[in-house]
Amino acid sequence: MSGKKVNHSRRQHLKTSAKFLSFALLLTEVDIAWGAKILGVRIWPSEDYTRITLESDTPLPITQQILTNPDRLVVDVQGLELNPTLKDLVAKVKPNDPYVSQIRVGQFQPGIVRLVFDLKEPIKPQLFTLDPVGEYNYRMVFDLYPTTPLDPLMALVRSSAKKESALEKANEEIDLIAQFATKKEKEAPKNPVAQAIPETKDVPASAKYKRLITIAIDPGHGGEDPGAIGAAGSREKNVVLSIARRLKEKIEGETYMRPYLTRDGDYFVPLHVRVQKARKVEADLFVSIHADAFIESRAKGASVFALSQMGASSSMARWMANKENASDLIGGINIKTQDRQVANLLLDMSTTAQIKDSMQVGQSILKQIGGFAPLHKGKVEQASFAVLKAPDIPSILVETAFISNPQEEARLNDDGYQDRIAEAILRGIKEYFSKNPPVARRLNS
């Protein structure tokens, strides 16, 4: 009997232990399911799209639905309890956001937070998650795209209509002068008055250009991707946007050029989209502007890079290309979209002619920068930068200075230096096109 009692006692002990273990596992599962912590919320509005990011310590399962009359996006996030960080999302919506009028946040059910995005117009949402990378934890990303995307070329044509008309008028005037001079020379070849007409007439400097030259200016990084960060806290994305805007203003002052910014605010643009944007506006030149960092703070000097099909021209160039090509991971690209397949196809294309032209314009710009600033190397370097792989557009990447160098970081934040860099880039561009004027567009282009 004593043996039976011992066995019964042992069975009871095992049952009790099993129940306790099951309860402990249940508690663990509850902690995993409902214990997610929101670490940050961010909104990045732009004309292209608005991005909302929720950063958490664990992945967030969600469901979504689109509602109309009025237009709304409703998102239920599981495993969350409403907290002050989530409530901050409401105050982050800006009045000038093109697509979101307001966000409402509430505790829909225990463990489920509901986000309601009140929209200004119908949108096509892309919702996806990002694994931890760099300084970020898990991110839930809401990209809200307009149902009818903007046409950048038409917007550019409208904004430069007056300049286009003035250029056409100047060219017509030159043609009339040439015709008049030819006629007079035929009538009286030795007539000094006829020969003097084309010489004394004030001929516009833009007369050699039959159309406006389009310069695509690409400020690196943006939004979730800050780029390199200096010791004093300067962010590459902010510095290069400032320089890009200065360059845009200077190009607008040229009678035969028009600028186009791939981004004109603090938002993320994937690398392949930057290339696609330049192609959509039929750019004659693509200039990507950066202010990178290196592992050694003593690295200094400006650089200019072109594409390489044969490997990098130096270990530094290879290191920088790898770093820049990782921007999509930091900024957050939706790799599940079909656009990614198109991107891979596009970025595999390049031509020898494109690289040759890129080297020429790059050398012109490098020479101008070297007139007042230290250079990291005196020649254009080459590496496989994804952002330079437009097959039909000369493309260069300008490293304006090393933001990781404290002296150069201070210089990059100086208005005078930024302006001189922008002016040097413009002079290099003008020198290149004075020797290589673009051909006329085909009527069906």
Image (spheres, rainbow, N blue to C red):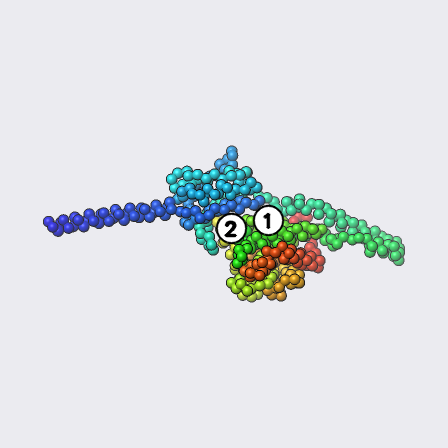
Mark 1 falls on what kind of element? Answer: loop
> Residue 151 in the image: x percent, y percent?
61, 45
Report the residue that reaches farthest toward the left: 1
15 vs 293, nearest the viewer: 293
166 vs 348, nearest the viewer: 166
Residue at 50% of width from left, 41% of height from top? Answer: 91
> Residue 55 in the image: x percent, y percent?
45, 48
Mark carried by residue 224: 2
Residue at 25% of width from left, 46% of height from top? Answer: 19
User: Sequence order check: which comes first, mark 2 or mark 1?
Assistant: 2
366 vs 298, nearest the viewer: 298
Mark 1 packing: few (<14 Cα in 10 Å), some, or many (20+)? some
- 221 with respect to 369 (left or right): left
Determine whether 353 is above or below 222 in the image. below
Between the residue at mark 2 and the residue at mark 1, the CA separation in whole angstroms equals 15 Å
Determine whether 117 is above or below 18 in the image. above
Residue at 18% of width from left, 50% of height from top? Answer: 10
Q: Is residue 393 visible?
A: no
Residue at 49% of width from left, 36% of height from top? Answer: 67
- 18 with respect to 416 (left or right): left
User: Type of residue at label 2?
Assistant: Glu
User: Type of residue at label 1?
Assistant: Asp
- 347 with respect to 31 (left or right): right
> Residue 101 in the image: x percent, y percent?
53, 39
Q: Which residue is mark 1?
A: 264
Mark 2 falls on what kind of element? Answer: loop
> Residue 290 in the image: x percent, y percent?
58, 57
Q: Is residue 93 visible?
A: yes
Q: Are marks 2 and 1 in contact (CB under 8 Å)?
A: no
118 vs 92, nearest the viewer: 92
